[in-house]
Amino acid sequence: MTSSLSPLHILASVAGLASLFALAACAPAEEGGLEDVEITGQVNIYSSRHYDTDLALYEDFTRATGIKVNRIEAGADALIERIVSEGEYSPADLLITVDAGRLWRAVDAGVLAPIESETLAERVPESLRHPDGLWFGLSTRARIIIANASAVDTSGLQSYADLADPAFKGQVCMRSSTNIYNISLLSSVIAHAGEEAAQTWANGVVANFKRPPQGNDTVNIEAVASGECGVSLVNTYYLARYADKPEILDKLTIIFPNQGEGETGTHVNVSGAGLTKSAPNRANAIRFLEYLTESKAQQYFANGNNEYPAVVGVAPTSFVEELGEFRSDTLSTATIGAGQAKAVAIYDAAGWN
Ligand code: FE
């Protein structure tokens, strides 16, 4: 092993990792257990997803292959930073995260390696994977409009552009522009309509704000349901969290934007995974990634968080199905990721904090 890292740095890093993997091993106990499984290999996953269903998925893979899944969970930016600082000694095999913007950051940080896999190329639609195989989308979510019909005239809400219509002055509530979902959405507007149009749109939305941006998608769902706000934007899977709360859900008008003829379709984004450059268990990692695109795994992965499975033909949950069919924006996820810096500058200029 050659490295520019000092021995002290390596020691610190290894010690840190050992404690982190120990932490991961203490995470919620496995249903059914894996005591009977003969472990023949391992794969190390750095993931910013934390769903119980993901755990079931990992165990299912171990039972089928004998490959043990070790995981470290943290925020995406922290994981990317960690892989960078661990350098060639990073034990990470796969990075799993949400949003094209974060996958793009991982590419930009140079931590991902290309995969050539017929299985992945066949199962993951082209618009949901990196053109050079640096990452693959595994599930998608749509960013849609929610409105309170007793607060606003919802017939005037058909597209993202309408959020900037003065008709909705004092009605629009949003989360912060530093949030990756909003950054990716604006990045798609830039890609479709150009920077000037994107700036005009952001300015118009800010002019319609009811209050300064605050909270997350959940907070804004509840603000719209209560009538405090007339309209907001949310990712589809958050709505599923209110499936048994009709007092919230029934108050919302749900609009898949940009469905009109000649319009772009609704903005969708991905949860995805990429192989790391330093992956010590490269073959196992590719095998795991391919496994994630099998029908059963797709259901665990996507349905655990009420997302749309990336693989065509796999059914979403009944809640997601009931949201109805829509036309998605086919803009490549890689393009959405690449426009982040411009999007941030435009939000800043608009005063959308
Ligand atoms: Fe989210």
Image (cartoon, rainbow, N blue to C red):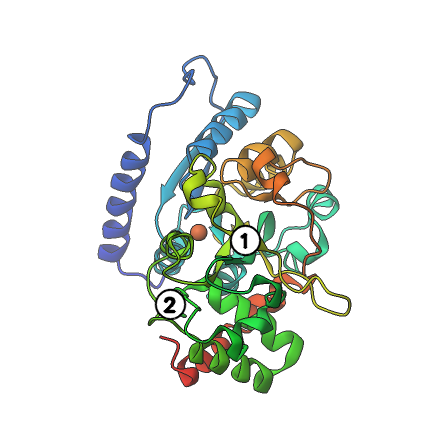
Is the C terminus in the top left, top right, bottom left or bottom right quadrant?
bottom left
Q: Position of residue 337 (x, y in %)?
A: 55, 66
CA gap, disc 2 and disc 1: 22 Å
* x and y, in percent, of residue 223 in the image: 37, 56
Indicate the amino acid at tag 2.
Answer: Ser
Label 1 residue SS: strand
Residue at x 50% of width, y 35% of height: 304
Residue under numbered circle 2: 176
Q: Is residue 173 left or right of residue 299?
A: left
Q: In the shown orientation, is residue 178 left or right of residue 145?
A: left
Q: Residue at the location (47% across, 26% down)?
A: 59
Residue at which label 1 appears: 253
Q: Nearer the viewer, residue 83 or 141?
A: 141
Choose between 46 and 179: the one closer to the eye. 179
The answer to which quarter of the image holds residue 230 is bottom left
Q: Position of residue 272 (x, y in %)?
A: 55, 50
Q: Mark 2 or mark 1, which is nearer to you? A: 1
Is ligand 1 within 8 Å of the beta carbon of the residue shown at mark 2?
no
Residue 110 seen in the current view? no
Q: Is mark 1 within 8 Å of ligand 1?
A: no
**Callout 1 crowding tier (Cα within 10 Å): few <14, some 14–19, many ≥20:** some
Q: Can you tell which quarter of the image residue 176 is in?
A: bottom left
